[in-house]
Image (spheres, grey):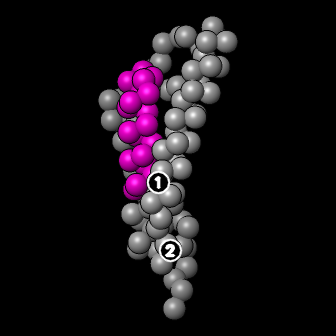
């Protein structure tokens, strides 16, 4: 919805799967378990989210406006910050 380059299904699902893979990979360092089912379900959730957004966009013609992006790398910044927050803030104390 925010970035024009992510308004097609391929890039959206790829970004969602990459985000999920990053979170699953970071769980290896947090004493948590990883599961391929989580990755698949998160990618499926990305597909559902895209189709819900597409339906809402068609119903509400007001959403057809132009997106304003701060930089070309803005999605990458958000992805890195979200993963860093999940990695560092989830385990704010060390468990012996």
Q: Which mark is residue 25?
A: none
Q: Was residue 66 drawn as part of the magenta stretch in this picture?
A: no
Q: How far across and how far down the image is residue 96, in percent?
A: 51, 91
Residue under the point 65% across and 19% down? 56
The stretch of residues the image draws in magenta is 4-22
Q: For this view, does 16 lie left or right of residue 52?
A: left
Determine whether 28 is above or below 74 in the image: below
Of residues 88 and 51, which is closer to you in this image?
Answer: 51
The residue labelled by disc 1 is 39
**What's the magenta bit mostly, secondary-structure-wise?**
helix
Q: Tell me if I can see residue 15 in this picture.
A: yes
| Left or right: where 14 falls relative to 88 | left
Badge count: 2
- Specify few, some or many for label 2: CA neighbours under 10 Å numbering under 14, 14-19, or 20 or more: few
Q: Secondary structure at mark 2?
A: loop
Label 2 and label 1: CA atoms lie apart by 15 Å
Going by the image, does 94 lie left or right of 26? Answer: right
Residue 53: x and y in percent read: 59, 25
Residue 13, image x, y percentages = 43, 37
Residue at figure coordinates x 45%, y 60% from the top left: 36
Q: Earlier in the sequence, mark 2 or mark 1?
A: 2
Residue name at image x 47 percent, y 54 percent: 39
Query: Residue shown at 38%/39% (left/top)?
Result: 14
* Label 1: how many Cα within 10 Å (few below 14, some 14–19, many 20+): many
Residue 31 placement (x, y as % from top left): 48, 78
Residue 4: quadrant of the picture: top left
- Residue 28's image quarter? bottom left
Name the disc covering residue 32, or none. 2
Q: Secondary structure at mark 1?
A: helix
Q: Quadrant of residue 90?
A: bottom right
Q: Is residue 70 visible?
A: no
Of all residues, the one furthest to the bottom in this rendering is 96
């Amino acid at each position: 919805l925010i970035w024009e380059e992510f308004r097609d299904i391929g890039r959206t699902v790829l970004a969602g799967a990459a985000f999920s893979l990053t979170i699953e990979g970071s769980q290896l360092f947090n004493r948590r378990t990883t599961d391929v089912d989580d990755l698949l379900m998160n990618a499926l959730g990305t597909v559902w989210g895209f189709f819900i957004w597409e339906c809402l966009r068609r119903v509400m013609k007001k959403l057809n406006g132009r997106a304003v992006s701060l930089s070309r790398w803005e999605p990458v910044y958000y992805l890195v910050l979200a993963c860093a927050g999940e990695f560092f803030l989830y385990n704010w104390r060390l468990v012996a």
